[in-house]
Image (tube, grey):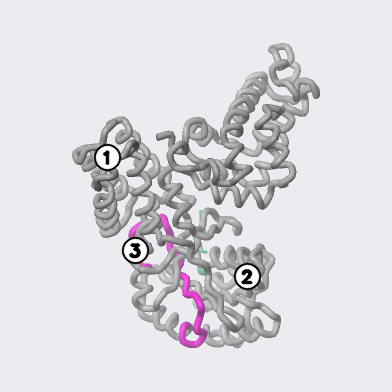
Amino acid sequence: MFDNLSDKLQRVFKNLRGEGKLTPENMEAALREIRVALLEADVNFRVVKQLIENIKVKAMGEEVLMALSPSQQVIKIVRDELIKILGSHESKLRFANEPPSVLLIVGLQGSGKTTSTGKLARWLSKNGHRPLMVSVDVYRPAAREQLRVVARDVNLPIYTGTPEETLPADLVRSARKEAVNTGRDVLLVDTAGRLHIDEDLMTELQQLKEQLSPVEILFVADAMTGQDAVKSADEFHKKLGITGVILTKMDGDARGGAALSIRHVTGQPLKFVGVGEKFDALEPFFPDRAASRILGMGDVLSFIEKAEEVIDKKQAVEMQRKLIDNEFTLEDFRDQMKQLRKLGPLESVLSMMPQVGILKDLKNVKVDEKEITHVVAIIDSMTPKERANHMLVNGTRRRRIAKGSGTTVQEVNQLLKQYAQARKMMKSFSGGLLGKKMGKFKLPNFLGV
Ligand SMILES: Nc1nc2c(ncn2[C@@H]2O[C@H](COP(=O)(O)OP(=O)(O)O)[C@@H](O)[C@H]2O)c(=O)[nH]1
Ligand SMILES: [Mg+2]
C-alpha cells in the first residue's frame, strides 16, 4: 500500500542510526530526505511542508539531540506527525437517529462508486446493519444494471425502480419508502459520475442532498490518480460539502500520496480504503495503523483482527504453547498453512506484517494457492514420525516424500526450509501476536533500532 514510501523512510532512519550521534546537520539532511520521499510518494506539497515543519520543530529540540537513542525519538516524532496529518483517530460512519440513514456515494466516473457501494453494503451487513442499495445513474442504463449485478453478488437488496421512475428524485423517494417498509436501516445511494466535475452533475447532487438530508456524503477517490483525486475531493467538498472519503485502488501501485493529503487538504476524514476488486476488499481507515504501515512497522492490529475472524482461538492458544515449548511440528505447519489460506491471499496478509529481517524476505516470496496445496501434499506424504521431527527427513526420505506427493525433491527441500523459517519467525512473534496483542510490539525493539 505504501511500499515505496515505506522503503525510503526506512532507509533514512537506517542512515540516521548509523550516524551515532545526531547533530543539527545530519538531522537537517535526514529531514531533506524525508521531504523528498514524501514528495516522490505524491504527497501534496502543502502537506509535506507542514509535516516537515512540525517534525523539525520537535526533532531539533534539546531532548531529542541529547537522547540516548535519538533515531528512535525521531521515528516516534515522524509517526506522531503522520498520524496527525492522517486524522488522529478513526472516523466512524455516522448514522441517523431515525432510520434509514442515507449515505450518498459521489465521485468521478470510474473512481469506484458502484463497487464501493457493494463493498459498503456488505461491510454494513457484516456489522449488524440492514442496507438497501439504489442507483440513480439514470443516464447510463448499464450503470444501473451494474449495481444490480453487484447487489446479486453480495446477496443484498437493491431498489431497482419502476419503468416510470426515470428521475433520481423519484427513484430515491421510492427507495426510501421501500427501506422503511422492509425495515432497512441504511440506504446507499450510488450516483452518476462524470469524467470531470460539471455544473449539471453538481446541481443534481445538491438536489439529492436537499431531498434526502444524507448523514454521510462519501466522496469516492481513485488513489491511482494521486493529487488529482485530492483536487477533485476538494472541489466536491466546496460545492457539495462531503463528510468523508473512500479511497479506492490502494492495492494498486498508487504511491499513497492521496491518502496522506486528503484529510489535510479537504479537512474531511478518510473513512475507508478499497484494497481490491472483490467485495470484501474494503477496510475502515485507521490513521495510527496507516502510519505504522508507512514506517514499516506493519499493521499488526489489522492482521490480528483479520486472523481472529478466521482462526480458531483454542487452536491458536495451543499453537502458541507449542511454539514457546518448541513443539511446533510439520503437522502444525500444515494446519497453519490451511488456516493461512483462509485469511486470503498470502501477499496481502504478509503486507500487514512488520517489514523487518526475515519477514522482509518472506514478503517477496510469492506464494500461490497451488504451492500451499503442494505443501499440504508433501506433509501428508510423511510418516507421523517425520512430521513430529523434521530432523529425521534425510536425503532418502526426501526422495520418497517427493515421489509420494507428486512433487520434486527441491520442493521438499524448500518446504523444510520454509518450515524452519516459520518456526523461527513465529517464535519471535508468539508472545505478541497470538497472545497479548501489542504487548511486545513496543516501537524500539520492533524496528531494531
Ligand atoms: N484494484 C481495485 N479496483 C477497484 C477498486 N475499486 C473499484 N475498482 C475497479 O474500478 C473500476 C471502476 O469501478 P466502478 O465501481 O464501476 O466505478 P464508478 O464509475 O465510480 O461506479 C472497476 O473495474 C472496479 O473493479 C479497488 O479498491 N481496487
Ligand atoms: Mg458506477
In x, y percent, where is residue 376?
72, 32
Identify which residue, 351 or 49, lies in the foreground.
49
> Quadrant of residue 17 in the image?
top left
Vertical placement of residue 56 versus 422, above or below = below
Per the image, the residue denoted by label 1 is 66
Q: Are marks 1 and 3 in contact (CB under 8 Å)?
A: no
In x, y percent, where is residue 286?
48, 57
Please say whether residue 216 is one of the residues in the magenta stretch.
Answer: yes
In x, y percent, where is residue 394?
70, 13
Per the image, the residue denoted by label 2 is 148
In x, y percent, where is residue 138?
52, 78
The quadrant of the picture occupied by the C terminus is top left
382 displayed left or right of 44: right
Mark 3: which amino acid? His
Number of numbered markers: 3
Mark 2: which amino acid? Arg
Q: Residue at x 70, y 81 (%)?
A: 182
Inspect this view and state whether residue 110 appears: no
Disc 1/disc 3 C-alpha distance (Å): 32 Å
Q: Residue at x 64, y 27 (%)?
A: 419
Q: Residue at x 29, y 43 (%)?
A: 64
Q: Which residues lie in the magenta part?
A: 209-233
Neighbourhood count class around disc 1 (C-alpha, 10 Å): few under 14, some 14–19, many 20 upward: few
Question: Mark 1: which secondary structure?
Answer: helix
Task: Tell me which label, 2 or 3, sits earlier in the chain.
Answer: 2
Question: Which circle, 1 or 3, is nearer the viewer?
Answer: 1
Per the image, the residue denoted by label 3 is 264
